[in-house]
Amino acid sequence: MIGVIIAAGFGSRLWSVSSKIPKTLLPFGGGTILSTIITQLRDAGVDRLVIVVGYNQEYIREYLSTLDTETPIEIIENLEWERGNTISVYKAKEYVNNESFILSMSDHLVCVSALERVVGYSEDDNLLMVDPYIQENFDLDDATKVQVENGFITSIGKKIDHYNSLDCGIFRLNSAFFDAVEKAVESGDESISGAIMQLVNNRCMKAITLDAPNQWIDVDTPEAYEHALNTFKL
């Protein structure tokens, strides 16, 4: 299965405006956040990768050229990286070639056991990995909230009033997602959540729910990065 990692943005909440190096290249474990994500996806069964780059992409390109990943990687350029993050995913459309694919953020660390459930899912459904252990989350205020009912996602967003899970930043998507992106962008919403809501409204977005807490972390702030370094176990 193919995996798409979007690594085009700046990451201003974690990284200072004077920094040049994309935050996905911050040290983690024996490598970086990015190399950890690549390894986790590979170990979960992803055998091809697309990485979408934009902001100071030369750092990521140079880093990848020295990395022995054992997984073929295609690098795609997004010169519109200052727009919403769904634009980066859309850049990968021709590379996934109507196949289902795994979508990963470049700052979400996820345990292999959780990833395997998404990669190995037997049906060609659109899926989002969700976390029902809300109070265990390190940064609940910043997390994207999700309402799940009978296995289907009924609402998603950072500001929704009613929710029973959190968005883990790992999706399994089919070609219908790209139609949803086009509709969302046409309506003025360039976020991934906006495109997902198009699928939600057509009852085309299912949830795959974590069976234990603390299987993922969003490294979006200095505090979250410090927490990941000190306590998060892959």
Image (tube, grey):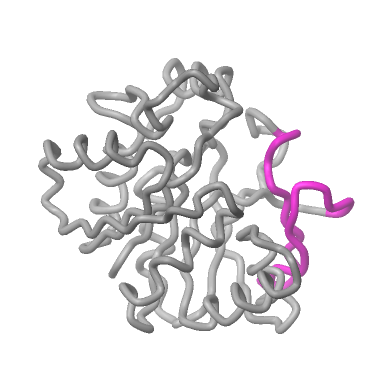
Residue 98 falls in image quadrant: bottom left
Name of the residue lying farthest toward the front: 79
Total number of numbered labels?
0
Task: Give the left or right position of residue 16, taking residue 180 as reference.
Answer: left
Q: Is residue 145 above or below residue 94?
A: above
User: Which residue occupies the foreground of this view, 233 or 55?
Assistant: 55
Q: Residue 204 placed where, x, y %? A: 63, 81
User: Which residue occupies the foreground of this view, 4 or 90?
Assistant: 90
Q: Residue 125 placed where, x, y %? A: 51, 79
- Asked whether the viewer can see residue 76, the reply is yes
Say which residue appears at 53% left-offset and 19% top-offset. 16
Q: Residue 167 placed where, x, y %? A: 62, 51
Residue 14 falls in image quadrant: top right
Say which residue appears at 40% left-offset and 64% top-offset. 102
Magenta includes 158?
Answer: yes
User: Which residue occupies the foreground of this view, 79 or 221?
Assistant: 79
Q: Is residue 196 above or below residue 224?
A: below
The quadrant of the rendering that contains the C terminus is top left
Task: Give the left or right position of residue 223, taking residue 93 as reference.
Answer: right
User: Which residue occupies the foreground of this view, 136 or 5?
Assistant: 5
Residue segment shown in magenta: 140-162
Task: Give the left or right position of residue 38, taking residue 108 as reference.
Answer: left
